[in-house]
Image: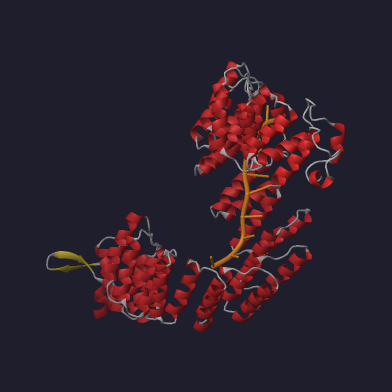
Amino acid sequence: MLINRIHRSLLHYLTGSSHLRTPPREWIEPYIDISDLAHHSPRDPQPSPWLLRILSLLVSSSTPEPDLRSFCGSFLIRLSPCFVAAALRHPSLLPHPAAAVALFRFAAAQPSFVHSLDSYISLLHLLSSSPPSAANARLIVAELIERDDLILTPAAAGSLLRCLASLGLVEELLWTWRRMKECGVEPSLTSYNCLMDGLVNSGFVDSAEKVLEVMESGNSGDGVRPDVISYNTMIKGYLKAGRNDKAAARFREMSAKGVDPDKVTYMTLIQCHYAEGGFYDCLSLYHEMEEKGVEVPPHAYSLVISGLCKESRPFDARMLFDKMSERGCRANVAIYTALIDSFAKIGDEEQAMRLLQEMKDDGFKPDEVTYGALVNCLSKAGKMDKAMEWFEFCKANGIVVNSIFYCSLIDGFGKVGMVDEAEGLFSEMEVKGFVPDSYCYNALIDTFAKAGRIDDARSMFERMEREGCDQTVYTYTIMIDGLFKKHKNEDALKLWCRMIDKGITPTPASFRVLSIGLCLSGKFNRAMKILDELAPMGVVPENAHEDMIKVLCKAGRIEHACKLADEIVDKGREIPAKVRTMMINALRKAGNAELAIRLVHSKIGIGYDRVGSIKRRVKFVTLLSL
DNA sequence: CTAGGGTTAG
């Protein structure tokens, strides 16, 4: 509306049909530099900045075409191809790509208007930058491809390759490549790199590899040999495809070929290792950068410090942080938060608090993530008074608390057995309008279950389902554990089956809870059967047998432990010697040294008896009659 | 108007 008023007034002024000699300043000032008006006429064939600015306002308004039509009509001008190309080249004048498309379309609809190559390229540039819009770009390129009268120049071809590569429009990229040849444009090193990037971005890693091989073989034209960017692009591609070994091989190979890895090479690798939890690899790559004198980008510090924090090595992280600061690299809220979280997680409240103060002194405002981390760690440590103090501090000081705070606190109160407080916080959260997510439900259900209030746990579980809140493997694990503790074995087993039926993949932890529950109720055959069913689902609990035997021994059910051990050996699931060691360790740990020693000095598990004429392994159950 | 990498809490 405002735009319409401004432009109507401007049109009147500019076309001389207004009684106003000059437009009121407040109409125009926010949009254009008034001093421009004095020096330009709207009939000027060269697009002046203010004319472009008005045009951009028009095309970004809600009804661009009629506005544009009246604008052009009032000026008695026709948009010329060079004017449109110039307008499209000014991204600051066209902040919305949709507006650029509108102008492009409007111009094309003018009688006898033909877009220049520059217009296509400028528009594609806009569509490939933030936020990229591959679908729109594809339509524009399709029109470009139809235009066989357009001749690609080296600069235009290069620009086109870059847009198409970053948009991942591979077919269009290959068309450009062919068209370049037709127009006699020799691909440069940059062209090759763009081609590789385009292939990599759309998942054609093998094709990118072939391009790189052509470059290496020297069949790619004069002086075109892979450089550090070629290798970086290839490495990015391998990592994207999960082929980390090939990435590592290229990384080693490039140095051998005289191409030194640079900061982007290292960043690409560090980023990938970070995402996969390979924090040790991040650190060694960082050290390599130091040794080789490669410039360390601020983000590399961020990732390596965060990695050390996640590895529970806050002191090492702190040392690197100091080094970073010495080098003049400014920290940020995320790094401070990671450090505070890490110190708080290892229980070093003093260091955490010191960093919080340093952070403020450094000019950073701790945010809800920072305080959220603090509240979580204090809750995990059972320091509920302090956790609540910080929580109240946030509420009083304009820090937006969220369901994560509530979840941490509910979990903390639950762990120290303060069920009423946990329940109270859950209701407070709801009253304040937060919709509890699965984390919050899990925390409260766990609280109830641990306190033996299984019916309350169950009703929350059902409410969760009713309200469509995502029930995860954690939810089921908590419930199954709680049900076994109340000896509701059948219900627990039913819940396990329901979880499987819902397509929720069990975790080793969830099977641990189930198997322990089943074993303690004497149903280890059932546990073994379920264990067998896990493998096809891709779940392999590492120490399942050991866990089961351990828990049976601990509960003093030696007979059952022996039966289970025999079962495992009879079915050939473990090497007998290993099961023997498991039994010995389990008995020892359960404080039953006497039986453990007896087992050590016997032939049980590894020796054989002759019963009748059949040779039979000495059963673990014979341990009980020794 | 031609290339490559980017974070913190349950």
Residue A74 at x, y percent in the picture: 73, 31
The correct choice, above or below, for A2 with respect to A198 in the image is below
The correct choice, above or below, for A62 with respect to A468 in the image is above
Q: Nearer the viewer, residue A275 or A53?
A: A53
Q: Nearer the viewer, residue A81 or A572?
A: A81
Quadrant of the rendered structure where residue A363 is?
bottom right
The residue under the point 59% across, 80% down is A384
Quadrant of the rendered structure where residue A149 is?
top right
Q: Is residue A326 visible?
A: yes
Q: Is residue A258 visible?
A: no
The residue under the point 62% across, 81% down is A385
Residue A163 at x, y percent in the picture: 61, 33
Q: Nearer the viewer, residue A417 or A525?
A: A417
Left or right for A602, reference A359: left
Q: How many marks?
A: 0
Left or right for A148, reference A522: right
Quadrant of the rendered structure where residue A115 is?
top right
The residue under the point 52% across, 77% down is A427
Residue A208 at x, y percent in the picture: 53, 32
The correct choice, above or below, for A551 with respect to A296 in the image is below
